[in-house]
Image (tube, rainbow, N blue to C red):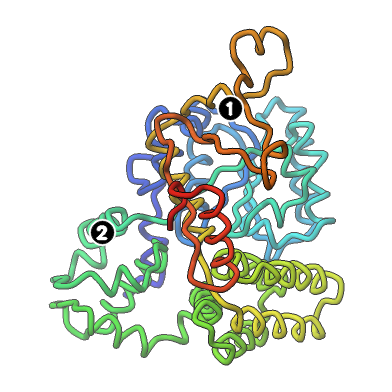
């Protein structure tokens, strides 16, 4: 009889020994793993894209802890469900039972009142909350609850992690072991997964199930053909959610207002949260347009505020106006590249010392040992400018920001060259 349990669920690990990825959190000696193994964990929010192991990590915690474990999905649960669990937790305290863990999947879908109902129990330690979210908790989790939780960020699975998962599936799953499966090409499986382990395993299972024989040879073309024939299955599982928002943003980045409006319509007709779309427009306005048209960020921010006030259906007009404006704006990712390169340098060079002349010197002792000495106050110079170094000695002269070729940033380039001469000789 065919096993109806999805492959991803059959392979869900229940110990750290077979948990793939997230070693920055659960590797030996890491803080979160130490908490779990000691059985003393804080309330926490697990934030990361789909298929990176948030629910699995919650299940592993349940296996390690000697206390009751409750699980809710924000999609089909409400305040009554939360209160029932809190009531059970309170009654169990009388019998000396350790406080239970309450896992809430997709906690970002809870309303403010639903999240409010958790506050007292979390604060008093009646329950330990583990919330999982694909959305930035700073936007979606109320500040009072967020302040009582530790936020852990889970990363997309690496190529090596995904290849390990495929190998584990082929060698340990009872159904797949019975078949003679050869994977000649992995690229399509990996690309379609988008770093989502669950999507990878589901795709592999769909491809395997498309064969009528036990001898199976998997190629890139075969994977693409089979997935295209089963696209409805992906829609039902919600896997196209991130593909469509990707198409939307790339249409804006590519200056195609028609593509932007089409993918916007797809999201709206599919019931997508308008605030989610508005936040992506805010990011695009800075990441893809930046200082080529600084007004784009202002308009995107106004769009976000207006959508929150107006709601559906009229909010769709504002989203359309903003998407069209961003698509028609000149593009620059210079600021995005600048901060990315600066962060990479910080990671490799560590905490370099702040040059003495630009250090803060609020006390006499600090002034005596040279803090702030030789600092030139820019407003005293000609044109409100003084030539001096603002980077640590080890990296002085490094350029992170490279103005793009658009009228606005051309003026930046000219301004910097006039002030700094050879230092900013772009």
* The label number, if any, that marks residue 40 in the structure image: 1
Question: What quarter of the picture does the C terminus occupy?
Answer: bottom left
Provide residue 281's location: percent of width, then percent of height. Answer: 64, 71
Judging depth in this view, the residue of 227 and 68 nearest the camera is: 227
In this view, 50 is above or below 379: below
Tag 1–tag 2 contact (CB < 8 Å):
no
- Rendered residue at 81%/49% (across/down): 83
Sequence-earlier tag: 1 or 2:
1
* Whether residue 221 can be seen here: yes
Question: What residue do we see at 49% from left, 67% from top?
Answer: 404
Residue 37 image point, x, y percent: 47, 29
Mark 1 residue element: loop
Quick check: 150 above or below 257? above
Residue at label 2? 163
Direction from residue 18 to residue 69 in the image, left or right? right
* Residue density around tag 2, few if under 14, some if 14–19, many if 20 or more, within 10 Å: some
What residue is drawn where x is 73% and y is 39%? Answer: 147
């Amino acid at each position: 009889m065919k096993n109806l349990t999805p492959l991803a669920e059959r392979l869900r690990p229940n110990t750290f020994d077979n948990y793939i990825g997230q070693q920055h959190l659960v590797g030996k000696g890491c803080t979160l793993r130490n908490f779990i193994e000691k059985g003393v964990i804080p309330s926490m929010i697990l934030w990361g894209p789909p298929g990176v192991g948030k629910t699995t990590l919650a299940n592993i915690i349940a296996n390690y802890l000697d206390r009751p474990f409750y699980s809710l999905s924000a999609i089909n649960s409400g305040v009554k469900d939360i209160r029932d669990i809190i009531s059970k937790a309170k009654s169990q305290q009388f019998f000396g039972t350790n406080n239970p863990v309450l896992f809430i999947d997709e906690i970002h879908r809870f309303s403010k009142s639903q999240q409010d109902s958790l506050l007292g129990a979390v604060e008093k330690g009646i329950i330990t909350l583990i919330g999982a979210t694909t959305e930035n908790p700073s936007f979606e989790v109320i500040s009072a609850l967020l302040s009582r939780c530790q936020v852990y960020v889970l990363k997309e699975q690496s190529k090596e992690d995904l290849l390990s998962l495929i190998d584990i599936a082929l060698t340990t799953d009872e159904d797949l072991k019975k078949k003679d499966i050869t994977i000649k090409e992995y690229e399509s499986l990996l690309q379609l997964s988008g770093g989502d382990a669950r999507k990878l395993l589901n795709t592999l299972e769909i491809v395997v199930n498309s064969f009528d024989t036990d001898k199976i040879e998997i190629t890139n073309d075969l994977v693409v053909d089979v997935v295209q024939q089963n696209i409805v299955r992906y829609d039902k599982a919600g896997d196209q959610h991130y593909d469509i928002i990707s198409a939307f943003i790339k249409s804006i980045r590519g200056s195609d207002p028609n593509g932007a409006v089409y993918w916007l319509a797809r999201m709206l007709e599919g019931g997508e949260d308008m605030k989610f779309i508005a936040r992506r427009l805010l990011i695009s306005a800075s990441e893809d347009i930046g200082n080529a048209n600084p007004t784009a960020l202002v308009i995107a921010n106004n769009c976000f505020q207006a959508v929150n006030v107006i709601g559906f259906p009229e909010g769709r007009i504002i989203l359309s106006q903003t998407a069209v404006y961003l698509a028609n704006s000149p593009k620059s990712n210079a600021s995005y590249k600048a901060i990315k390169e600066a962060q990479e340098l910080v990671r490799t060079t560590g905490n370099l010392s702040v040059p003495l002349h630009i250090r803060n010197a609020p006390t006499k002792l600090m002034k005596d040992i040279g803090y702030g000495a030789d600092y030139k106050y820019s407003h005293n110079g000609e044109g409100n400018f003084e030539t001096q170094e603002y980077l640590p000695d080890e990296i002085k002269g490094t350029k992170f920001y490279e103005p793009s070729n658009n009228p606005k940033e051309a003026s930046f380039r000219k301004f910097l060259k006039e002030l700094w001469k050879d230092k900013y000789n772009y």
